[in-house]
């Protein structure tokens, strides 16, 4: 009988030792997962505060991105849509038609509060079939997740139907702490006013976690700051066109189809902040570019290679 009891106890002990990690042992995650469906982001509209991962599954058939920005107190997504996004589309339409004077007049109608929108990262350019993922520290408040890539001269955030949003996703970050730890990274990309620097680590085949330090930041055309978008360089890739493509300001800027396969990145964030993004890389050559005018001339183009491991 003693032998039976001992054998049972030993089996129980061995089974406990060989068991995998329990849910309590796994690192706490705070993830908002959105799917691209047509010209909409679909998913939960609340997330806890603190370190927060925004993951966008892009099966929408074209290149998208997901800028995350915080709204000033008292400003709603409806106000942004009516007073900022629709005038930008009207200005763009006038510019495409060649009426630059009308385009400038419309652009001048922006409300003063628009300058208080705070860009806080979000997944960068991602081609169809790519899942973009960016992690930022988000305080409680009201936010928007937005894509403004263009197709046939129309921004994806624009919906001509009154009261209907395009790729404008209102998000509430609640006061409860998501308790997610700051991510680790295998490569660090530092952004200053003079360009990019891979300041630590290296890109590898497979999954990469990239720490992005916004050491310095500035606004271009009173709208966007420097950021990082990664694209694959194949034999037939027009590298110059791909490096220029994220620049929103030309009438054909961000016009689909994109001239390269974009695999992710992170949008602009304030100076002295840090964000993270995850990308999966196959062996080959890649470029990092920014959504600013003359990115390459301003130091915001970095070419790198990933070996076969």
Image (cartoon, rainbow, N blue to C red):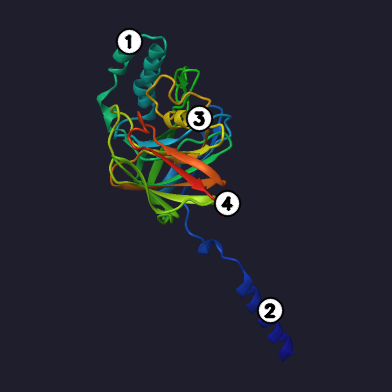
251 vs 18, nearest the viewer: 251
**Inter-mark Cα distance, 1 to 4:** 53 Å
In this view, 221 is above or below 194: above
Could you say which disc has been placed on residue 238 in the image?
3
Could you say which disc has been placed on residue 261 in the image?
none
Instruction: Please report whichever mark, 3 or 4, sits nearer to the chain's N-terminal start.
Output: 3
Q: Secondary structure beneath disc 1?
A: helix
Mark 3 surroundings within 10 Å by alpha-carbon count, few (fewer than 14), some (14 through 19), many (20 or more)? few
User: Looking at the rendering, which quadrant does residue 62 occupy?
Assistant: top right
Visible residue check, residue 217: yes
Q: Secondary structure beneath disc 3?
A: loop
**Inter-mark Cα distance, 1 to 2:** 80 Å
Which marked residue is nearer to the observer: mark 1 or mark 4? 4
Q: Secondary structure beneath disc 4?
A: loop
Could you say which disc has been placed on residue 308 in the image?
4
Quadrant in the picture for the C terminus: bottom right
């Amino acid at each position: 009988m003693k032998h039976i009891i001992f054998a049972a106890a030993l089996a129980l002990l061995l089974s406990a030792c060989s068991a995998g990690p329990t849910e309590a042992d796994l690192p706490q995650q705070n993830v908002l997962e959105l799917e691209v469906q047509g010209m909409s982001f679909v998913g939960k509209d609340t997330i806890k505060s603190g370190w927060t991962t925004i993951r966008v599954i892009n099966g929408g058939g074209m290149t998208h991105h997901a800028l995350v920005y915080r709204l000033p107190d008292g400003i709603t997504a409806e106000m942004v849509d009516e007073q900022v996004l629709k005038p930008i589309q009207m200005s763009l339409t006038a510019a495409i038609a060649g009426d630059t004077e009308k385009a400038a007049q419309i652009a001048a109608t922006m409300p003063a509060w628009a300058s208080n929108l705070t860009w806080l990262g979000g997944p960068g350019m991602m081609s169809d079939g790519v899942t973009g993922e960016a992690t930022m520290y988000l305080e409680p408040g009201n936010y928007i997740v937005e894509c403004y890539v263009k197709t046939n001269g129309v921004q994806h955030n624009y919906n001509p139907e009154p009261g209907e949003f395009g790729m404008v996703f209102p998000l509430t970050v609640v006061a409860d702490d998501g308790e997610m730890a700051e991510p680790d990274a295998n490569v660090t990309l530092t952004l200053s006013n003079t360009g990019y620097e891979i300041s630590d680590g290296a890109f590898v085949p497979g999954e990469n976690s990239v720490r992005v330090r916004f050491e310095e930041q500035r606004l271009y055309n009173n709208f966007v700051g420097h950021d990082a978008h990664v694209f694959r360089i194949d034999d037939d890739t027009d590298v110059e066109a791909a490096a220029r493509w994220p620049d929103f300001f030309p009438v054909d800027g961000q016009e689909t189809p994109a001239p390269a396969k974009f695999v992710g990145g992170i949008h602009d964030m304030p100076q002295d902040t840090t964000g993270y993004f995850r990308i999966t890389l196959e062996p080959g050559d890649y470029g990092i570019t920014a959504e600013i005018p003359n990115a390459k001339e301003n130091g915001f183009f970095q070419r790198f290679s990933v070996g076969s491991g």
